[in-house]
Image (spheres, rainbow, N blue to C red):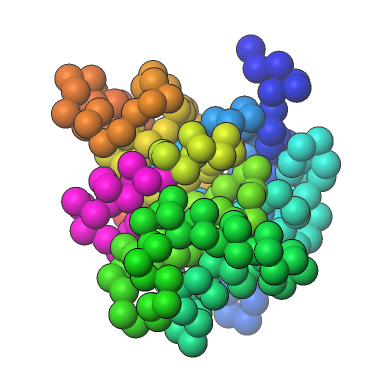
Amino acid sequence: MTKTADVHVALRGVSRVYPASAGHSSVHALGPIDFGFRRGEFVGVVGPSGCGKTTLLEIVAGLTAPTDGTVEFEGRVVRGDVPDGIGVVFQEDASFPWLNVADNIAFGLRRAGVDGAETARRVDYALGFMGLTDFRRAYPAQLSGGMRQRVCIARTLVLRPRLILLDEPFGALDQQTRLLMGEELLRLWRETGATVMLITHALDEAAMLCDRVAVMSARPGRFIGEVLTGWPRERDSRVVSTPGFGDLTGRLWSLLRDESRKALGMA
């Protein structure tokens, strides 16, 4: 049983209903959900398309208010705006095309009023950590998709979030790049000790990266099960070639198959 002191994020009775609009009835998108994230844990969330995964992330981040229930981060209820200590990375390229790599990474620090010397130190560290030092003066248009995503992750990293929320961060990348970016993400997680929540459609990505994978039902999205991966903290992409990896993805699919059929109207 998880000790109360170990719970970093707690969802209690969280649901989201979108009200009726002209010509459309109300939509029960999510919940109710009760769930806890342990401090320093890497948790994945998978589910059928349209089940409310992104809505769930936005509620945890404070970007969307739940219709019912509460989210607590470090013992405090999340109410509006992204609380200090939470960083969010979305699938879409969120780099600023008019800023070079270094200035993109420094953007949040400058906005927060961090002094110049500390900003420079953190940016230099992030550039080195993410393998971007040689591209510090390059602009996003000059970078590959994977490198632009590294810029977005670095921009979050320098703010030193204690909770990192990732919404399909590698969805636009090819499989080989996803594996390598996953290794970078695991290294970031170990380095920072942050709690991580990953939303993904890719079962192999969830099985490789996460300590625990929570599985959601078709809309309204609820948690219907979870799979513990059992990987050591010092893992990398080589786990995909181990005998147990296929079993993990198979277990996830066995939980998801019927729900995915419901989401597609095939059940």
- Residue drawn 41% across the image and 45% down it: 185
Q: Quadrant of the N terminus?
A: top right
Nearest the viewer among 108 and 230 is: 108
Q: Residue furthest front?
A: 117
Whether 163 is among the magenta residues is no
Nearest the viewer among 180 and 123 is: 123
Q: Residue furthest bottom?
A: 98
Q: How many marks?
A: 0
Q: In the drawing, does residue 240 fall left or right of residue 45?
A: left
Whether 177 is among the magenta residues is yes
Q: Which residues are magenta?
A: 169-185
- Residue drawn 59% across the image and 69% down it: 106
For residue 131, above or below residue 212? below
- Residue drawn 82% across the image and 45% down it: 77
For residue 235, above or below residue 161? above
Quarter residue 231 falls in: top left
For residue 261, above or below residue 133? above
Residue 84: image location, x then y, percent:
75, 53
For residue 238, above or below residue 136? above
Q: Quadrant of the C terminus?
A: top left
Residue 13: image location, x then y, percent:
71, 38
Residue 37: image location, x then y, percent:
61, 32
Q: In the drawing, does residue 42 fall left or right of residue 60?
A: left
Quarter residue 79 falls in: bottom right
Q: Is residue 261 in view?
A: no
Q: In the drawing, does residue 198 fall left or right of residue 48?
A: right
Nearest the viewer among 259 and 22 is: 259
- Residue drawn 55% across the image and 62% down it: 123
Q: Residue furthest top?
A: 1
Residue 19: image location, x then y, percent:
68, 67
Q: Is residue 70 in view?
A: yes
